[in-house]
């Protein structure tokens, strides 16, 4: 086998190892997070999502699955990705308020009973921390999907919040697992709300 073949095999083997490790540890936390999402939706709340960089792609995927469909046709579920509005995002950054990119939006559109979902693949940036603080100020619960354990975000969690943390993975290692976790959340939400 050539060097490229070895590299590909190593990438797949590493992915399988990380997946097996996550499967043995995060299952109960995913179910609790799904219950929190369902509770918000049943109480006429919406899911507000934020993420930086490549994790923003996962945030948009999650919102699309709720707004359109995951695997079955069903009514649309209210979800908004704060990172999808490039104009608003860039305007806040232009005014030298990068750390406010999400918190400013949460303060404007969040309401008690809504839920903030934060997806973190590359460390815990100040704008995500401020978004969580803004959500708590608006009496919103928070769910965090994180590539890293024991972070600044952990200390912000309230008793009714949920953090699902992987075992200190790099962004490239974490991305496929974050997608798996989002798929699990979508599947559980659909099952709990609509059956099937």
Image: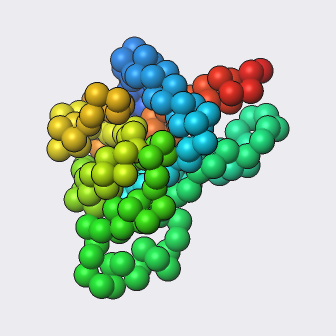
Q: Quadrant of the C terminus?
A: top right
Left/right placement of residue 15 relative to residue 70 reads left
Residue drawn 53% across the image and 37% down it? 40
Q: State the image coordinates of residue 53 (x, y, percent, origin top left).
A: 39, 61
Q: Is residue 88 left or right of residue 60?
A: left
Nearer the observer, 109 or 190: 109
Q: Position of residue 162 (x, y in %)?
A: 36, 31
Residue 107 position (above or below residue 163):
below
Up/down of 53 relative to 10, above or below: below
Residue 21 placement (x, y as % from top left): 37, 20
Percent position of residue 12, x then y: 46, 32
Image check: 103 left or right of 27?
left
Among the 4 quarters of the image, the one containing residue 7: top left
Residue at screen point 26% across, 57% down = 130
**Residue 195 vs residue 3: left or right?**
right
Which residue sits at x=40%, y=44%? 140
């Amino acid at each position: 086998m050539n060097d490229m073949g070895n590299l590909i095999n190593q990438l797949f083997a590493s992915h399988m190892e990380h997946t097996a490790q996550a499967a043995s540890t995060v299952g109960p936390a995913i179910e609790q997070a799904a219950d929190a999402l369902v509770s918000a939706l049943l109480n006429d709340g919406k899911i507000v999502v934020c993420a930086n960089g490549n994790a923003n792609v996962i945030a948009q995927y999650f919102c699309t699955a709720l707004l359109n469909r995951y695997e079955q046709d069903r009514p649309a579920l209210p979800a908004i990705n704060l990172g999808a509005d490039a104009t608003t995002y860039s305007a806040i950054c232009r005014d030298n308020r990068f750390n406010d990119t999400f918190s400013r939006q949460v303060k404007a559109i969040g309401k008690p009973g809504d839920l903030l979902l934060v997806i973190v693949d590359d460390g815990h940036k100040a704008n995500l921390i401020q978004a969580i603080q803004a959500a708590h100020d608006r009496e919103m619960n928070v769910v965090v999907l994180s590539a890293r354990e024991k972070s600044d975000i952990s200390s912000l969690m309230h008793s009714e919040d949920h953090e699902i943390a992987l075992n200190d993975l790099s962004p490239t290692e974490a991305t496929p697992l974050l997608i798996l976790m989002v798929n699990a959340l979508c599947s559980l939400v659909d099952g709990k709300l609509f059956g099937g």
